[in-house]
Amino acid sequence: MAMGFTGYLLPFDQRAYWASVVGVNINAGGPLIGPYLSDFLRGGPEFGATTLSRFYAIHMLLIPGLMAALIASICTW
């Protein structure tokens, strides 16, 4: 699900842009860490190049790394 959410913005067309705006705003409504998470995902007060680079880094580095670590921890258990 996280791969789908972060990968949807990567074409950076109008549909992807507005879908990501809605998704990040939904995250902003969460208790306690919601506003901080939405600011982190946006990379500032507005969507732009920083947002695109963060979504790309999360999509290509962070999530696959976490998946590999989870698989490795399960296989060695």
Image (cartoon, rainbow, N blue to C red):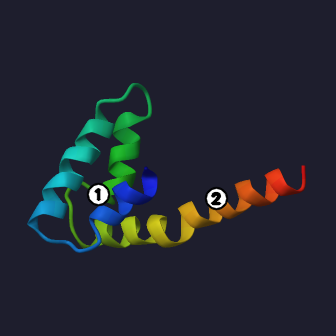
**Mark 2 element type:** helix
Density class for disc 2 (Cα within 10 Å; few <14, some 14-19, many ≥20) is few
**Image disc number at residue 66:** 2
| Rendered residue at 33%/49% (across/down) | 39
Q: Please tell me which residue is depicted at 38% across the width and 57% down the height of the picture.
A: 4
- Identity of the amino acid at label 2? Leu
Question: Furthest-left residue in view?
Answer: 14
Could you tell me which residue is drawn at 39 percent across and 66 percent down? 54
Residue 9: which numbered mark, if any? none
**Residue at the outermost top position:** 31
Q: Splitting the image into 4 quarters, where does residue 49 fall?
A: bottom left
Establish if 42 lies above or below 7. Answer: above
Q: Residue at x 23, y 74 (%)?
A: 11
| Left or right: 74 as drawn, with respect to 64 | right
Q: Is residue 58 left or right of residue 49?
A: right
**In the image shown, does 23 or 51 lie closer to the viewer?**
23
Tell me if 69 is positioned left or right of 22 in this view: right
Q: Residue 67 lies in what quarter of the image?
A: bottom right
Query: On the rendered structure, is 37 left or right of 74?
Result: left
Q: Position of residue 24 (x, y in %)?
A: 28, 46
Q: Position of residue 25 (x, y in %)?
A: 23, 41
Q: CA distance from mark 2 to mark 1?
A: 25 Å
Q: Nearer the viewer, residue 73 or 36?
A: 73
Give percent across and percent down for residue 16.
19, 62
Disc 1 is placed on an element classified as loop
Does label 2 or label 1 sit earlier along the sequence?
1
> On screen, 60 above or below 23?
below
Q: Counting other residues with Cα less than 10 Å from the Cα at mark 1, is it few (<14), some (14-19), or many (20 or more)?
A: few
Number of the label disc, if any, that sits on residue 44? 1
Q: In the rendered structure, which amino acid carries the disc numbered 1?
A: Gly
